[in-house]
Image (tube, coloured by chain):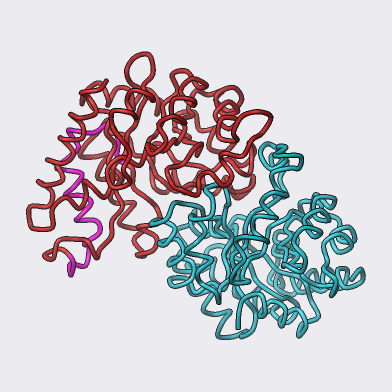
Chain colours: A red, B cyan
Amino acid sequence: MSFVAAIDAAARRKASLLCIGLDPEPAKFPAHLRARPDAIFEFCRDIVDATAGLVCAFKPQFAHFAAQRAEDALGRLIAHIHTSHPGVPVILDAKRGDIGSTANHYAAEAFDRYGADAVTVNPYLGRDSVQPFLDRGDKGVIVLCRTSNPGARDLQDLDVGGRPLYQHVAQLVAREWNGNGNCALVVGATYPDELRAVREIVGDMPLLVPGVGAQGGDVQAVVNNGRNVQGAGLIISSSRAILYAGSGEDFADAARREAQKLRNEINRWR
Amino acid sequence: MSFVAAIDAAARRKASLLCIGLDPEPAKFPAHLRARPDAIFEFCRDIVDATAGLVCAFKPQFAHFAAQRAEDALGRLIAHIHTSHPGVPVILDAKRGDIGSTANHYAAEAFDRYGADAVTVNPYLGRDSVQPFLDRGDKGVIVLCRTSNPGARDLQDLDVGGRPLYQHVAQLVAREWNGNGNCALVVGATYPDELRAVREIVGDMPLLVPGVGAQGGDVQAVVNNGRNVQGAGLIISSSRAILYAGSGEDFADAARREAQKLRNEINRWR
């Protein structure tokens, strides 16, 4: 099954557009976990096991593992999700972007080494930098379009021929890069007007929307402006607000309650 | 010593603007190395030891290590360069770009985990995505501007207010992001006119220029169009043409000869 179909199936089965971002920060772990040698894996695994019934995807963030020398834990975590929660796709949030021969290596890293079902990529280097990802028709390629951070405007809002650069990227991906039907776009929850503009350009294409929760994105505005005509097509990602909802031994329960609340809040506006 | 000063000092001491890109591809290794358990480290170390006297920097390419699960070899290689060849800066070519909190982790990965002296970053997410790198005043931040691949034109050449996006990036970095004097730009050797345009915008700022050698960039045009008023300010990077110049047990000697030839060819036009 292709990534786009798998996301859609998971969203229906779980009645959820929620994606949990797995951004492990050991300093924020519950005290009883912190000193354990495999704390990063154990923390993420417990969150995953507690919330897998509530999500359409998990999104491990590469840098949070790499900065801790935890590539091995990342690999085991993705394998655990596939084995214990089949049908829940894994998006590796790595924002890769490099030229042809190197892009091949990044595609191999994401899809073959880590076994991710989709990966986030940066469009600045152009089509050939994304081609090795696009060629993997069963995998998802989620292109950065309009990100959720304040600096997004520095380049992404620049006027190119009467519209902002991020809209040009949305059109490029929808019209030219999506030949295998495996593309999606990242649009931050913190900019609902931009989300609406992108939805109008890309039709039914899935949009990965980070920035609800800790970054302040408004759920109602995200769903209203971002959903496709089927009331879906959104992968709404929250990380810190769910992962660190509790700080005691019951942290996974606290995360599940927070995930349930956000899933229901999203569904309320669909 | 800051990265920019260190590069300049190395270029003077070695009379060289050559940077060797370390892109290990085990399938291209000499037969006697291929089966060895630590082949990636040993191959790169032998190249480094044979050529350190001829270069102003080494540039390991992250994906080539990551796709082989060789993060540990990458760390040991950078430590080896610092210990055995002090004064030769190491540029980690990772093309990172992510939002605030995650960018901190990528900066920690590059500078603290791996001990790199500089790292390549992608500007698409804007200033706050680069800030954690800029804040490390002793480290170099090398921003993608005009890359060497054919797809570079897809975004980088789009007209923004009467000039192409890559020139806007050059000006943004030179005027606004370079408060700590630790910025440089990536401009591909395959586009000498663009190199000249960037040099005119950024004054003396160092330019990292990949794409001579296997990608076909012309050395004379690169030096003529890219040097600053001191006849320097260029970090001209070649990878495959040097690394895989020989395929026998004498591969490191073959690499040294190729590096010497390219260094001399560069100096001929300074």
- Name the quarter where the C terminus of chain B is drawn: bottom right
Name the residue: 42% across, 48% down: A113
Q: Residue extending furthest right? A: B268
Above or below, B253 against A107 in this view is: below
Q: Is residue A58 left or right of B247 when viewed as pictured?
A: left
Name the residue: 60% across, 57% down: B25
Q: Magenta part mainly helix, strand or loop?
A: helix
- How many numbered callouts? 0
Q: Is residue A166 left or right of B254 when viewed as pictured?
A: left
Is A35 one of the magenta-colored residues? yes
Name the residue: 39% across, 36% down: A117
Q: Is residue B6 left or right of A228 when viewed as pictured?
A: right
User: Which of A86 and B128 lies nearest the eye of the viewer?
Assistant: B128
In the rendering, at what x and y percent does residue B169 appear?
Answer: 66, 51
In the rendering, at what x and y percent does residue A248 appear?
Answer: 9, 58
Q: Residue extending furthest top? A: A229
Q: Bounds of the magenta span?
A: A34-58
